[in-house]
Image: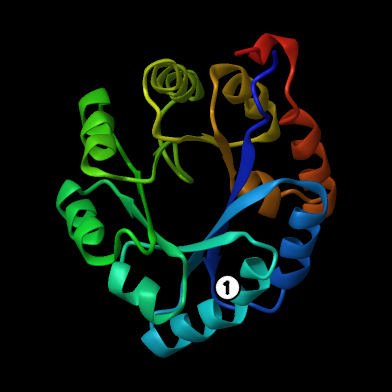
Amino acid sequence: MLKDAPRLYLITPPIADWTPYPPVFEAAVAVCDVACVLLRTSANDDGAKERIVRALAPLVQRHGVACLVADDPQWAVRVNADGVHIDGSRERLDVALRAIKPGHIVGAGGLPTRDAAMAAGEAGADYVMFGAPGGAEPHAAVVERVAWWAEIFNVPCVGYARDLASIGDLVRGGADFIALGDAVFADPRGAAATLGDAARLMAPTPEAAA
């Protein structure tokens, strides 16, 4: 029996102009099983940040895809996002869990040790993420952490793939979700071609049997 194929967790670059992104989201849902989009913004002004998220969030949510924002749980609720992704700080994770659970998603990333990941899962995070855009952790270490987690824990696990070639290892490691960022948005072929390749690479294989 094959393990279910992982779903796509799409991470945007820091966005200043939201207008190029609707076609990317449409391409993603057309070819991939998209679970989540993490919207990141580069705007310094709170009003500009809010306009970006309010413009883009409904475009993914109408397809049944969760829309998350980074770091600020109260702001996530205010802009009608589905939840928040917290990187690195146990204190901020605890604040988010108290503030918006159970009605909203709270995910945890930036987990430097196994103990930190276990603590996040035990605290009530909806998922843990290993690897991150711009992260220094080697691919092999991300795969090892994903495989360890998938073998032992029930809390879903996200593995970040820095490029398309990284996807297969994460699938075989047992990741529930594959996170893609620059691999999609920096590909000169365009997002649609990249996402099509990603969908094929995330398909279940005999090596990923449960």
73 displayed left or right of 148 = left
In the rendered view, would you say 169 is above or below 45? above
Q: Which residue is mark 1?
A: 57
In the rendered view, would you say 60 is above or below 128? below
Residue type at numbered disc 1? Ala
Residue 68: tell me if it is visible. yes
Q: Nearer the viewer, residue 64 or 7?
A: 64
Q: Please, which colouring scheme is shown?
A: rainbow
Residue 10 image point, x, y percent: 60, 51
Using the rendered view, name the quadrant where residue 209 is placed.
top right
Q: Nearer the viewer, residue 12 or 65?
A: 65
What residue is at 54 percent from the left and 82 percent from the top?
Answer: 54
Residue 11: tell me if it is visible. no
What residue is at 30 percent from the left and 60 percent from the top?
Answer: 101
SS assignment at label 1: helix
Label 1 packing within 10 angstroms: few (<14), some (14-19), many (20+): many
Q: Quadrant of the N terminus?
A: top right
What residue is at 38 percent from the left and 62 percent from the top?
Answer: 104
68 displayed left or right of 17 = left
In the rendered view, would you say 181 is above or below 141? below
In the rendered view, would you say 172 is above or below 176? above
Residue 35 image point, x, y percent: 60, 50
Extreme residue in the bottom direction: 47
Q: Nearer the viewer, residue 193 or 4?
A: 4
Residue 58 image point, x, y percent: 62, 76
